[in-house]
Each structure stands twice: as structure tokens, then as C-alpha cells.
Image (tube, coloured by chain):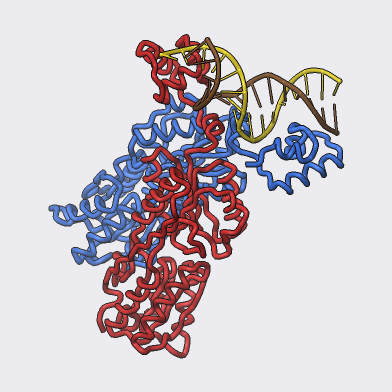
Chain colours: A blue, B red, C yellow, D brown
Amino acid sequence: MTSIKDVAKAAGVSTATVSRVLANNAPIKTETRKRVLEAVAQLNYRPNLIARSLRAQKSAKIGLVVSDIRNPFFTAIGRAVEDASYEQGYSVLMCNTDENPEKEELYLNLLHDENAAGVIFSPTQQFSLASSTYKTKMPFVIIDRAVESKETDMVLLDNISAAYDLTVHLLENGYRKLAGLFGDVSTTGQERSRGFHKALKDYQLNPVAAYFVSPRIQQGYDATLSLLNGPDHPDAILTSNSLLTAGALQALRDKKVSIPNEMALAGFDETTWGELVDPPITVMAQPTEEIGRTATELLFQRIREPSRSPKTIILNGTLMVRGSSAKR
Amino acid sequence: MTSIKDVAKAAGVSTATVSRVLANNAPIKTETRKRVLEAVAQLNYRPNLIARSLRAQKSAKIGLVVSDIRNPFFTAIGRAVEDASYEQGYSVLMCNTDENPEKEELYLNLLHDENAAGVIFSPTQQFSLASSTYKTKMPFVIIDRAVESKETDMVLLDNISAAYDLTVHLLENGYRKLAGLFGDVSTTGQERSRGFHKALKDYQLNPVAAYFVSPRIQQGYDATLSLLNGPDHPDAILTSNSLLTAGALQALRDKKVSIPNEMALAGFDETTWGELVDPPITVMAQPTEEIGRTATELLFQRIREPSRSPKTIILNGTLMVRGSSAKR
DNA sequence: TTGTAAGCGTTATCAC
DNA sequence: GTGATAACGCTTACAA
């Protein structure tokens, strides 16, 4: 591997001079610069980033810590984070926690040990800012799931309003017996449930059911089946993420429940397929691209200025009204 | 930051001893080991991986270089790669090339400069093994898209057979006027087109059309519209990835073309929504989990034994017959 | 069984 | 303007 020493030798200068030419941060005689650059080109020299990181005590890497990149919501965010990082010359380490606090801890430690410049982080419910890892002062930006602290940057959705609006939409369209399926592993599910209940209360109604389940397709399916078999049959189901929506839809299809006639369906998160199914699904779309990009920008701000006061950015969802919740 | 020196001082030993205790690769007096481990625990010491990488001239990171992690095929592979890497104590750098050779080059260089242990790589068509980056001898495993070389490990689908089988399925079910939509950016699309044509030839038929388009939803949509508007109306469309399938489906829905009565639809890649749409879509499912895991294992093999002779592993697709290609 | 010290490839400091 | 050199934190000959 060709190192800065080889370049220095080839150009007949010291390594310091090569470094300065490349960093372009000191006056260099034009003639010298030329010789150095020629040697660099000649030898196809590329600085070793590991050595640079060791010396500088920081690296151009950020961690993306989420539960599962296969959740389309996180896929989209991940891509946006990667794009924004790429533009800044940073690269992204992908870390899936599976909602497992041990994996989470392990990854945060890893990122710390790798001298990561920062972390974009959707924490498990068990995560606590008081944990030892956090004390290391790696820059964090929390996304999707609020944590109790005003000491850290966050990019969140206004979950209560979003769920409220989605619920009101169902109510305005004539549905009265609403059931909600919420993720049980994050604050997000709880907040959306709050919005759901608030809307029902404003309409002086009670929910038929509000289930907290593991936010996966299978659980959406199972929960929907149990709603269908239960005594109090809802006329609309609201789900708090796209995996639950997919499960619910599958169950309704299997049980030949007609949508929206017998049962409306509306959920969080836009997907490729939301418009492709019949009827297309009404969703509260989250601005995933914006979340990812904003979080990354916030992170870079903090990396540059560690002491700037923390910001929480609250973004709004967009209601995409489609056939699955048509007026009855 | 607490370093090995601090631990050494606290334990009253040299840094070498601390290193040995932690690496567990040399005889250490029990008493000494105990003192060292206590100091480690006391100080909450964690070895700096950057320094370790610099010293060892390699890192526990691998690159995942694909066109776009949002393609569900790559999302699934990415997750499998991450899982397999995690088990080996490696972490994964996510690199999206957008089929752009410049981004690809840049990322390969970055991985090189980061001393990445290896790369799992779905190359653009322009990529050439002769390129300078490859000469650096970073371990590669090529996935999804064959390259001309028997010098590198690959994990591929038997695209020709898979496309052949999918086409035969349509033919066996009574469809005769077949159109194919294939990705134009990779060898994959070409191979699938070959299988498509081969099957038609075996049935002594000609395709109605075979389009090569950018493998994205919009292009699937546009191509399908032009098929519908064209003179020779197909009775079945075969697509070479799930984005094209989604676009085609959207177009058929918009034009109120009944599936499968007026037009069958079948494509590559399983998705969340394949079963949710009505009718559900017949697909040639790729074993994404297995591709990702196999590629990662192959990569680790090569990292351990750089000189072992290259392997190409060809996996088979699984035909999932569903309503969109029902017998006519 | 343990310590000393060299060296991985950079860059910043201090001389000149 | 440029060159020596120390230092970043770790591991591994080589010595003892």
C-alpha cells in the first residue's frame, strides 16, 4: 500500500509537505505543490482514512440505528440519511436492533469505539439517556420516537395530531365503531393511540378496541382476526404503521370482509403498495425523506458545534385520502 | 477517553500485558489477569477500534454496494448481510450507487481507504474488474449481476431458467401474446430476457414486445401504457423486477384492464404487497435472505483465506403461482 | 510471565 | 516554505 512516505520520497519532500499540499492549509511554493501532486497521481496515492481518524480522533462515519431497515419507513429514512451524508463526505453504518436493547447497546458501543462522528437513532423503549453509552457524548439525533430529555436533538412527527386527524377523517366519513392497532414497542404507538382516543372523545364516542401489539405483519393479521371474531364488530380499523396495515388488509381479504363497505381501513405510513391494492389505502404519510435529511443536517450541525442548544423538530404528516375509507 | 495506558497504569502492568489479557492469546498469571480485568471494569475501558484497525491493517467493516436500498430486493439482502455480519462481529457500510458509475467508484475507493475487510457488491454495467479499484485486491463478492471473470466470488440467480420457467408458466396457462419489461441497467435484465425468449421459441411463438427500460416504477408504468396503446395488444406482461411490476399494475388499474382476464401479470421478486393486491401477483421469488447470507459467508471465507479458488453460487428462484396469471 | 519499544499512516507543533 | 518529530491507541517481536 502506498503511503504518504512513498509520495514524499518520490517528490523529494517531507511527509509534512505532502500532508500540507493535500490539506491545502498552508503556503506552499507552486513548484513544490506541482511535484507533490505529480507524485500523488503517479503513485495513485490515497490517504489512509483509518490513520487519519486515529490522528484526528474522529471519523467521517455516522451510525443509523433503527429497529429494522426492512420497515419501509426506515428504508426510506435510511436512504435519505445516506444521501445527505454522502454529500458531506460521510458514510453510514447500518445497525438493526430488532427492538432488542442488547443489540442496541452493542451497536452504540461499537459506534463509540469506531469514533463515529454521530448517530441517527430510533431508540427502543428501554433505552435511557442516562445509560453509560450516552454519557460518552457522541452526538445523537433521535428520530421517530421521543425520549424524555431536552438535551438532545430530535426529529419527530406530531403523532398525536396525525392520529387525531386520521381518526377524525374516519369519523367525518361516517364510521362510528373504530378499532385501533398500535405498536407496543415505542412511544410512537402510545402517542398515536392518544390522538385516536382524543378524536373519539371529541365526538363523544368510545373505541371498540385499542390493541397494542408487536408492530409486524403477523400481529396485524392476528389482531384483526380477533377483532372480526370479537363481540363488538368495528366498522373501521386504524393502524399505526404499514406492517400492521398489511397484516390487517390480509386478514380482511382472507375473511372476505369488503372494504370499505363492511370495514374501513386507514393507517400510518405511505408504501409502494398503498395505491396498488383495491381499494387503495388511506394513509397518514410521514415525510420520510425530510425526516432523514433533517436529522442528518441536525447531526452535522451538532458535530460542528457541539454546544449549540438542542432542537426538536416536529414535522407533520400528510393525509392521503383513498378508497379504503370512502364516505359511507 | 480512557486508553490502554490508563488501564495499564491502574493495574500496575504494562500496556502489552493489558493487550494480552484482552486478546487472551498469551499465558498470564491468574493474579495479573484479575487485576487487569478489574481495572478494565473500573475504568469502563473499551479498546479503540480505529487504533486497532490501523495496527492490524484491516477493519471489521464490510461494504454493501447496491444501486438503491429502497428496492425491496436489496432491502432484504441488506438486512441478511447485516445479520450475518453482526454474528461475526462485523459492521456494514451502506452504499447506494443509483447505477451511477462515479458514485460506485467513489464508494469502492472509500471502502478501500477505510481498510474495509471486503465488499458485497452489485455492480453497474459499466463496472469493470480491470478498474484500478479492483486491483487493490479487496475481497469482493458479486451479487445479483454477473461479471465477466472467474476470478471473483459470486452469488447469482439462475436468471435464464427462472425467466424461462416464469414464461412457461404463462404459456402453460394459455397466454400467447407475451410482452416483457426488463431492466436495462444490468446483465440481469438481459439474462431474464434470454429466458423469456427461449421459452417463447420453444413454444414456437414470438414475443409481442420486449422492452428494456430503467427498472423503476414510473418506467414500468409508462412502458405498460405504451403496450396498451400499441397495435399488438399483449395478453400477458412479464416484468423483471418488483418496481416494474408495481408500475405495470398501476397502469393496468388506471386503464381498467382486468387481470388476469384481459391481461396476465407476472414478475420477479417477492414483495410485501404481492399477495395483498387483487388479484395477487404471480412472482418468481428470489431467495433474498439466502443470497445475502451466502454472500456474506463467502466473503468471510475469502477474508480468512484470500487465495482459495473463487466460487460462483447459483441459486434458484421459486415460482409463486397466484391469481394474476390464472388459467384462461 | 512480563516489559520495552517499534511501528501502523496521519497531521500538528515547533524549528529553521 | 519546509523538514523533523511527536503523538493518536493499539499489538507484537524481542528481551529479560
The answer to whether residue A7 is above or below residue B271 is above
Query: Residue at 44% of width from left, 70% of height from top?
Result: B244
Q: Is residue A81 left or right of residue A235?
A: right
Instruction: Please tell me in which quadrant of the rendered image residue A158 appears.
Output: top left
User: Depth check: A316 or B316 in front?
Assistant: B316
The answer to whether residue B32 is above or below residue A1 is above
Q: Is residue B65 left or right of residue A260?
A: right
Expressed as whole percent of the image width and height from the top left, the position of residue D2 reads 82, 32
Expressed as whole percent of the image width and height from the top left, the position of residue A229 reads 14, 55
Query: Residue at 49% of width from left, 58% of height from top?
Result: B151
Instruction: Please tell me in which quadrant of the rendered image residue B262 appears.
Output: bottom left
Expressed as whole percent of the image width and height from the top left, the position of residue A324 reads 32, 63
Q: Is residue A302 visible?
A: no
Q: Is residue B287 left or right of residue D11?
A: left
User: Depth check: A38 or B243 in front?
Assistant: A38
User: Depth check: B110 or B251 in front?
Assistant: B110
Q: Is residue A262 visible?
A: yes
- The quarter in which the C terminus of chain B is drawn is bottom left
The answer to whether residue A149 is above or below residue B272 is above
The answer to whether residue B111 is above or below residue A18 is below
Query: Residue at 57% of width from left, 50% of height from top?
Result: B108
User: Depth check: A296 or A315 in front?
Assistant: A296
Expressed as whole percent of the image width and height from the top left, the position of residue B145 reads 47, 63
